[in-house]
Amino acid sequence: MKTVKTLKISSYFLKFLMSISFLIAFSLAFIYFHSMFYPKKYSNLIVNKERNIQYIFDIEKAPKTYKEWESSNKLFYYVKLDNYSKFSIIWTKVATFTIFFIVLFLFDKIIRNTKNFDLFFQKNIRLINNILKLIILLFLFNFVVKGYSDPISMVFEDSGKPHFITSGRITFDFLIYYPLAIIFFYTLREVFKRGQELKQENDLTI
């Protein structure tokens, strides 16, 4: 009874994380398209050097010229980014959260199967295989994005000439937690495979 309750709580928690992932991905996509038509509404959006988006309430308006930016706090305003930087920042995150949503969905299916005592069935092994592939895809995706993407750039139109301010900082923390997740799900898959083999042997014995 306690195990069933724990699995139920885990399933609810995964659904909560799925909702957050979906909401973030949808919000980022909305920001990307909505800012094309109403850029002034996003003057408070800042992009840091790790390519994370922040909303700051008490920030000054985005400077119109390079000189104004030079005399300000020199923040990276989302509305002043060039088109490539906007696309890169938004859609790499949308892709990441979408894949993360699918991983959570598949993991929730495993928990539901476990709750129904379908623990070592072939479908669970297939689910773990799919999760493993998605995590490897996320790992490679992060490696390519953070290792080979261009730094973010802002453009100011002063005297008809654009000014590009390029900056970027790469973090490699994903080299730690993605391999750990891959090892975990690989081990879990092998445990499930062994469990299925033992179950089949037991069925034959009976």
Image (tube, grey):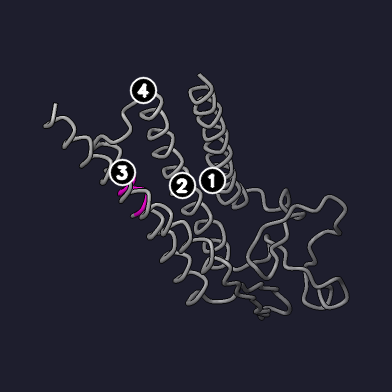
Say few, some or many: other residues with alpha carbon within 10 Å of mark 4 (under 14 / 14 to 19 / 20 or more).
few
| Residue 100 percent across, percent down from the top left | 47, 48
Q: Residue at x 67, y 57 (%)?
A: 53
Which-is-in-front pick, marks 1 and 4?
4
Give the spatial CA distance, label 3 vs label 2: 26 Å
Left or right? Give the position of 197 relative to 75. left
**Amino acid under label 4?**
Asn
In the picture, the disc for residue 116 is 4
Q: Label 2: which residue?
A: 98
**Amino acid under label 1?**
Ala
Give the spatial CA distance, label 1 vs label 4: 31 Å
Q: Nearer the viewer, residue 48 or 66?
A: 48
**Amino acid under label 3?**
Phe
In the image, which residues are magenta?
127-132
Q: Earlier in the sequence, mark 3 or mark 1?
A: 1
Q: Is residue 52 above or below residue 205?
A: below
Q: Is residue 160 above or below residue 182?
A: below
In the picture, the disc for residue 192 is 3
Say few, some or many: other residues with alpha carbon within 10 Å of mark 1 (under 14 / 14 to 19 / 20 or more).
many
Left or right? Give the position of 11 relative to 155. left
Asked if marks 2 and 1 touch (Cβ < 8 Å), the reply is yes
Q: Earlier in the sequence, mark 3 or mark 2?
A: 2
Q: Secondary structure at mark 1?
A: helix
In the picture, the disc for residue 154 is none
In the picture, the disc for residue 25 is 1
| Residue 197 percent across, percent down from the top left | 20, 42
Which-is-in-front pick, marks 3 and 2?
3
